[in-house]
């Protein structure tokens, strides 16, 4: 049995990437269909229609590649537009080392006593990349300048997604302890994402990956299992700065994991968002690998905030402003200035 985290999704496969002979195609299809049952939209008329149309294609397949187009459509029908099917070649390409989205790290600059934290998109299956991302965040907050900042602007305006758990951890010094987010499955059951200091848990377990849907076993434990325990907390345990005013800049590019960051701050006191509507990928993804190395990324739940407000689409800002011409950042900066003592960060 092997496991990997790909694009923010915890994947598990029994005998992953094993060859599939002609006699095994029926089992391959059965395994894919069982995994797809975990999708948020399974049971809807759209799912039923897609399944009825694609099932004859799947049953007529002679080799796994004959199923790819049908499984691609069914993945989207089961999980919505945030879900997709990847061929073995596409899966291998996405997990190569040194791809651009695996090299990014959080950055900071200061405007007087105002901290400006940029959380970029990031995804990697490689532990050294994940460690570098988290250590960069830890070093930002483990500094006298960060501790003296009276307020923060958090910029996810150019963040198009990736590892949501890593991004929430990167921002955890600014988040209140307790439940910061909830995931709700199609049966209405919700589970909590909680911050404690600069560590993260999901549904009462340490969280550094998203749920597993393991082929013929369907959705394990209804909500899946936690991923590989690699980094459940920021290294070095930097000082918590919760309670400082936080203004978040968002845009139509802020997608998936970036929207998870937006939701994590929603409902926190002295926090506001600025910019345009987010991209609208507010479902939570799990996934599974098939025996030939193909991968299904599958949405199984909606993102919701600490107060139980769930999103199925874009997230509007509290204060609309253009994120492209700088006015969203300027408005965010001014708002934080007003929250700081004497209205000044100098």
Image (spheres, rainbow, N blue to C red):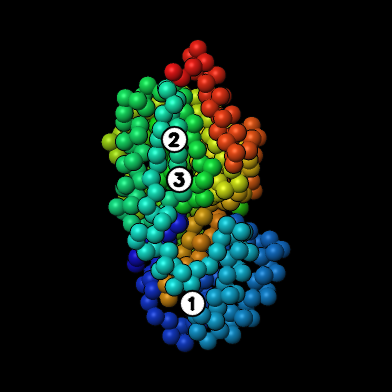
Residues 194 and 27: in front is: 194
Q: Give the x, y percent position of residue 261.
A: 50, 41
The secondary element bearing badge 2 is classed as strand
Mark 2 is surrounded, within 10 Å at the Cα level, by few (under 14), some (14 to 19) or many (20 or more) other residues, namely: many
Asked if marks 3 and 2 touch (Cβ < 8 Å), the reply is no
The secondary element bearing badge 1 is classed as helix
Q: CA distance from mark 1 to mark 3?
A: 37 Å
Asked if marks 1 and 3 touch (Cβ < 8 Å), the reply is no
Mark 1 is surrounded, within 10 Å at the Cα level, by few (under 14), some (14 to 19) or many (20 or more) other residues, namely: many
Q: Which residue is mark 2?
A: 117
Q: Which residue is mark 1?
A: 28
Residue, far front: 325
Of circles 1 and 3, which is in front? 3
Q: CA distance from mark 3 to mark 2?
A: 10 Å
Is 265 left or right of 170, judged from the image as shown?
right
Q: Which residue is mark 3?
A: 120
Give the residue drawn at x 71%, y 63%. Answer: 45
Query: Is 116 drawn above or below residue 162 in the view shown?
Result: above
Quarter placement of the N terminus: bottom left
Of circles 2 and 1, which is in front? 2
Of the image marks 2 and 1, the number of the one nearer the N terminus: 1
């Amino acid at each position: 049995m092997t496991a990997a985290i790909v694009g923010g999704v915890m994947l598990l496969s029994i005998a992953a990437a094993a060859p599939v002979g002609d006699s095994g195609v029926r089992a391959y299809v059965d395994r894919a269909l069982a995994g797809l049952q975990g999708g948020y939209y399974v049971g809807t008329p759209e799912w039923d229609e897609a399944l009825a149309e694609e099932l004859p294609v799947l049953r007529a397949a002679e080799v796994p590649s004959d199923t790819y187009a049908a499984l691609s459509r069914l993945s989207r029908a089961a999980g919505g537009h945030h879900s997709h099917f990847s061929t073995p070649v596409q899966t291998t390409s996405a997990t190569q080392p040194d791809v651009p989205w695996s090299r990014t790290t959080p950055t900071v600059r200061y405007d007087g006593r105002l901290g400006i934290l940029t959380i970029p998109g990031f995804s990697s299956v490689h532990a050294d990349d994940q460690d570098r991302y988290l250590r960069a965040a830890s070093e930002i907050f483990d500094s006298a300048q960060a501790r003296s900042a009276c307020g923060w602007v958090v910029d996810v305006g150019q963040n198009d997604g990736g590892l949501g758990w890593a991004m929430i951890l990167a921002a955890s010094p600014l988040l209140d302890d307790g439940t910061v987010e909830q995931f709700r499955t199609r049966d209405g059951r919700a589970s909590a994402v909680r911050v404690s200091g600069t560590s993260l848990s999901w549904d009462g377990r340490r969280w550094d990956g998203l749920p597993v849907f393991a082929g013929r076993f369907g959705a394990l434990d209804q909500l899946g299992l936690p991923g590989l325990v690699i980094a459940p907390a920021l290294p070095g345990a930097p000082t918590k700065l919760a309670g400082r005013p936080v203004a978040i800049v968002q845009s139509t590019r802020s997608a998936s994991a970036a929207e998870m960051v937006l939701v994590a701050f929603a409902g926190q006191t002295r926090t506001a968002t600025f910019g345009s509507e987010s991209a609208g990928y507010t479902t939570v993804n799990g996934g599974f690998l098939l025996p030939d190395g193909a991968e299904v990324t599958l949405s199984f739940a909606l993102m919701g905030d600490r107060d139980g407000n769930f999103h199925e689409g874009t997230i509007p800002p509290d204060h609309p402003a253009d994120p492209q011409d700088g006015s969203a950042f300027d408005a965010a900066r001014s708002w934080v200035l007003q929250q700081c003592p004497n209205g000044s960060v100098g």
